[in-house]
Image: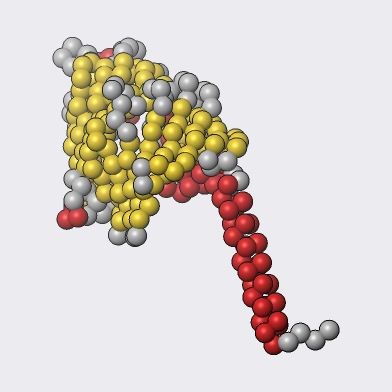
Amino acid sequence: MILAPAAQTAHKNMRRWSLAGALLGGLLALLVWAPASWLARGLASVSQEHLLISDTRGSIWNGSGMLTLTGGAGSRDASTLPGRLHWTMGLGFGGLQLNASQDCCINGELRLRLKPGLGKFEIAIAEQPDWLARWPAGWLAGLGTPWNTLQLGGSLRLSSKELRLEWRQGRWHQFGRLDLDLLNLSSRVSTVAPLGSYRFSVIGAGGSGSEGSSSLGLSTIEGALQLSGQGGTTGGRLRFQGEASAAPGREAALDNLLNIIGRRQGARSVISIG
């Protein structure tokens, strides 16, 4: 049977619409059933393979996995937290809302707002009344040297204030503050226990003229081991200058540890990055 020109045109249009419908349906199905491993690959890329989600199950919208610290690509060092990390993700607040929970380590539920835009991407953390997450300090051994030598005891406690990260012009820009408290630390290379408690802070400079800069600070809350330091990040480059020393009367007990922490200059151990 030979179709008239008008019928041939209508037939071609129907085929095009059918193909377009099939492609759209396939794309929607792919998004709905996207595996959790996609989220894991994204996190690995952003963290340069230092923070991984292994043994993933479910989808990027409702999934779980094991959270692991490593020394990076090719490293044999790795440390995995006990218990699974669970997350759900959906539309909300003009973007995506990601909620994460982990019985061992997250304070209730960690809520992140993900907001894509033209040439930029934003991540904001919802305020918590106290701390966001708490991990065993021994987890840091997964990062390799010097953490695998120190074999720390104690805990790490993460908190934030008005924290927001924005990716634009190829760089991350931080707004707000992030604090990591290192509480009641101990180490297998020192007989002094605990060594002390410390705070490491990252404070964002924010605005467009900052070139993605943030300031870093390390201070001693209390302890026999005294730590202090300052630094920052600019244009994706990290610089930090700090020092470690022993409180009066604890010099002999901490001498070996000070040799490992940094470069010795008399009674001090100098820590230099960048």
Q: Quadrant of residue 199?
A: top left
Asked if one can make out residue 260 in the rendered structure from this viewpoint, the answer is yes
64 sits to left or right of 112: right
52 sits to left or right of 211: right
Whether residue 211 is situated above or below residue 163 in the rendered picture: below
Asked if one can make out residue 142 in the rendered structure from this viewpoint, the answer is no
List x then y, in percent, for residue 10: 66, 78
117 sits to left or right of 248: right
List x then y, in percent, for residue 191: 34, 13
Number of numbered tags placed on the structure image: 0
In which quadrant is the N terminus drawn? bottom right
Q: In which quarter of the image is residue 254?
A: top left
Q: In which quarter of the image is residue 182?
A: top left
Residue drawn at x 26%, y 44% as measured from the top left: 174
List x then y, in percent, for residue 141: 44, 29
Residue drawn at x 65%, y 62% as measured from the top left: 22
Residue drawn at x 32%, y 33% as measured from the top left: 126
Q: Which residue lies furthest to the right in this view?
A: 1
Residue drawn at x 62%, y 57% as measured from the top left: 25
Q: How was the colour assigned to the protein in this rendering?
A: secondary structure
Of residue 81 and residue 131, the one placed in the foreground of this image is 131
Of residue 248 and residue 148, the one placed in the foreground of this image is 148
List x then y, in percent, for residue 103: 48, 21
Of residue 45 and residue 92, the one placed in the foreground of this image is 92
Whether residue 59 is situated above or below residue 130 in the rendered picture: below
